[in-house]
């Protein structure tokens, strides 16, 4: 199974699940992470295959980390995350 097929299978399982879960999709810039997510969630919705009614999407693009791997501006990140999360509720 190719890596794109494996990713697709996992996203589809996530979308069908009725249990609350978190899915993290990582990869280099421009490989199609957002495109794939948007395409699969649209298809699942059209086919009535969504396990939950709502989903939250958070992009960490542009997030700056310290050399120790910590978020540089944690307050800004937290405020942005919760604004986006509340908008999806």
Image (cartoon, rainbow, N blue to C red):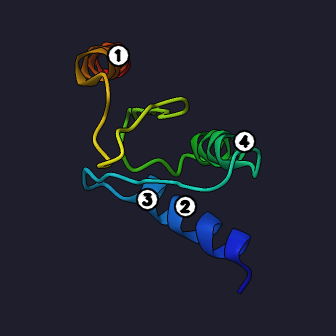
Q: Residue furthest front?
A: 67
- Residue indicated by mark 4: 35
- Residue indicated by mark 1: 80
Question: Judging from the image, what secondary structure is the residue with disc 3 in?
Answer: helix
Work out whether residue 13 or residue 66 is closer to the camera in this orientation and state it: 66
- Choose mark 2 or mark 1, whichever is in front: 1
- Choose mark 3 or mark 4, whichever is in front: 4
* Residue 36 against residue 87 in the figure, above or below: below
Question: Judging from the image, what secondary structure is the residue with disc 2 in?
Answer: helix
Question: Judging from the image, what secondary structure is the residue with disc 1 in?
Answer: helix
Q: Is residue 70 left or right of residue 84?
A: left
Dot label at residue 25: none
- The answer to which of marks 1 and 4 sits earlier in the sequence is 4
- Residue indicated by mark 3: 14
Label 3 and label 1: CA atoms lie apart by 24 Å
- Choose mark 1 or mark 4, whichever is in front: 1
The C terminus appears in which quarter of the rendering? top left
Q: Residues within 10 Å of mark 3 (few under 14, many from 20)?
A: some
Mark 1 vs 4: CB contact within 8 A: no
- Percent across and percent down for residue 19 are 25, 56
Question: Residue drawn 34% across and 39% down?
Answer: 66
- Residue indicated by mark 2: 12
- The answer to which of marks 3 and 4 sits earlier in the sequence is 3
Q: Residues within 10 Å of mark 2 (few under 14, many from 20)?
A: some
The N terminus appears in which quarter of the rendering? bottom right
Q: Is residue 85 left or right of residue 35?
A: left
Label 2 and label 4: CA atoms lie apart by 14 Å
């Amino acid at each position: 199974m190719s890596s794109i097929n494996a990713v697709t299978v996992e996203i589809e399982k996530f979308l069908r699940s009725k249990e609350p879960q978190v899915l993290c999709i990582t990869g280099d810039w421009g490989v199609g992470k957002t495109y794939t997510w948007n395409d699969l969630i649209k298809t699942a919705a059209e086919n009535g295959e969504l396990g939950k009614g709502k989903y939250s999407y958070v992009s960490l693009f542009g997030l700056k980390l310290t050399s120790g791997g910590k978020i540089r501006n944690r307050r800004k990140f937290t405020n942005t995350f919760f604004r986006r999360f509340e908008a999806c509720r």
